[in-house]
């Protein structure tokens, strides 16, 4: 039932977007009017429901338990990555991803202990692939930005990939026990939102347009993933942003090189520098940037 509801929400967002096209189209965000409306809706739901629950979860759950739960869901994500690596015909990477899942599922007790990140094998660097990157590998590289209800930033390509991953690849979808399956989905949402608390607090306090910041940072990170630069820390990510000043994502012909575009990317870069500074001073084990725009 949960999967069917998610699929209907995805389909509804694809149908309704055309009713909210912005009069002044941004080449990388041609449906900005619709996207901003959905962003406001998501932000309202988040502030009223998800964020308070995530804050309560962080408050009552011991750090060791939170780390184990996060490892468990990361292990599921690693399984999705392994399948997509094989679908991309990257068999060497697929074997490495599979090895990571096998080690963590067995020795790591269903993934609650991330053994692969602490051993001396070749599994320490976590790869991340999904059906959206698989579609990009097969030629669908350019896709317009789209904010999905409840799911957040995406594109038409990645929205399609999200549906395929959720319906056919995610192992949770194959659990027959409805209560257990739905409980795992709810747990995944809460865990993901808890990882985002520090990032969203920074966005709320930022002196820039939160919507534009989320859009630009998400598109930049997604482009980096598709270009094969998924394994990036803050410093490497900032270097990548500074190297790609024009950033053409939506189309090859409509690159915005105006002063406003350069200023937007400069503001985005500045905010990531602030995030990096916060991370260096944190004592918690909760990751921040790796979940900034990746919640799916």
Image: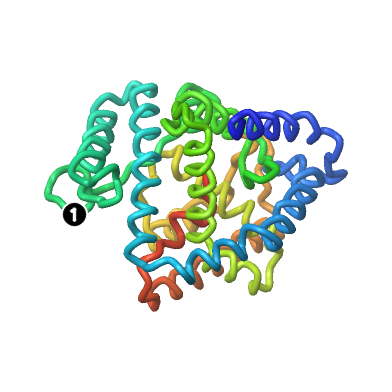
In this rendering, position of residue 204 left or right of residue 36: left
Q: Is residue 93 above or below residue 29?
A: above
Label 1: element kind: loop
The picture places residue 207, in percent across and down from the top left corner, at 68, 73
Q: Quadrant of the N terminus?
A: top right
Residue at 43% across, 39% down: 227
**Outermost residue, left side:** 120
**Outermost residue, bottom side:** 281
The picture places residue 100, in percent across and down from the top left corner, at 24, 39
Q: Is residue 138 above or below residue 237?
A: above
Residue at 57% across, 54% down: 217
Q: Which sits in the foreground, 16 or 59?
A: 59
The answer, for residue 287, to whether it is visible in the render is: yes
The answer, for residue 266, to whether it is visible in the render is: no
Residue at 77% across, 51% down: 36
Labels in figure, total: 1
Q: Which sits in the foreground, 224 or 169?
A: 169
In this rendering, position of residue 275 left or right of residue 96: right
Tell me the quarter of the picture where residue 277 sits: bottom left
Residue at 62% across, 56% down: 214
- Tell me if mark 1 has few (under 14), some (14-19) or many (20+) residues whose alpha carbon lies within 10 angstroms of its own: few
Q: How is the image coloured?
A: rainbow
Q: Which sits in the foreground, 155 or 105?
A: 105
Tell me the quarter of the picture where residue 80 sits: top left
The picture places residue 20, in percent across and down from the top left corner, at 85, 40
Q: Is residue 84 above or below residue 193?
A: above
The picture places residue 76, in percent across and down from the top left corner, at 38, 39
Q: Which sits in the foreground, 41 or 126?
A: 41
- Which residue in the structure is indicated by mark 1? 118
């Amino acid at each position: 039932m949960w999967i069917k509801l998610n699929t209907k929400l995805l389909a509804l967002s694809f149908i309704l977007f055309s009713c909210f096209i912005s009069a002044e189209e941004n080449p990388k965000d041609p449906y900005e009017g619709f996207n901003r409306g959905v962003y406001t809706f998501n932000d309202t739901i988040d502030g009223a429901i998800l964020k308070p629950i995530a804050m309560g979860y962080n408050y009552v759950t011991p750090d060791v338990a939170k780390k184990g739960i996060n490892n468990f869901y990361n292990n599921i994500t690693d399984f999705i990555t392994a399948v997509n690596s094989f679908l991309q015909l990257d068999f060497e990477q697929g074997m490495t991803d599979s090895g990571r899942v096998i080690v963590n599922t067995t020795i790591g007790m269903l993934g609650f202990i991330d053994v692969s990140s602490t051993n001396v094998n070749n599994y320490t660097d976590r790869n991340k692939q999904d059906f959206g990157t698989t579609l990009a590998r097969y030629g669908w590289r350019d896709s317009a930005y789209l904010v999905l209800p409840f799911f957040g930033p995406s594109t038409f390509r990645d929205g399609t990939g999200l549906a395929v991953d959720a319906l056919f690849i995610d192992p949770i979808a194959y659990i027959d026990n409805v209560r257990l399956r739905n409980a795992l989905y709810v747990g995944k949402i809460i865990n993901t939102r808890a990882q985002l608390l520090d990032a969203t607090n920074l966005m709320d306090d930022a002196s820039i347009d939160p919507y534009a910041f989320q859009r630009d940072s998400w598109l930049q990170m997604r482009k980096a993933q598709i270009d094969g630069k998924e394994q990036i820390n803050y410093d490497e990510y900032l270097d990548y942003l500074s190297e790609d000043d024009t950033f053409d994502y939506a189309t090859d012909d409509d690159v915005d090189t105006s002063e406003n575009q350069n200023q937007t990317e400069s503001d985005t870069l500045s905010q990531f520098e602030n995030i990096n500074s916060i991370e260096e001073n944190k004592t918690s084990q909760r990751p921040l940037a790796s979940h900034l725009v990746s919640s799916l």
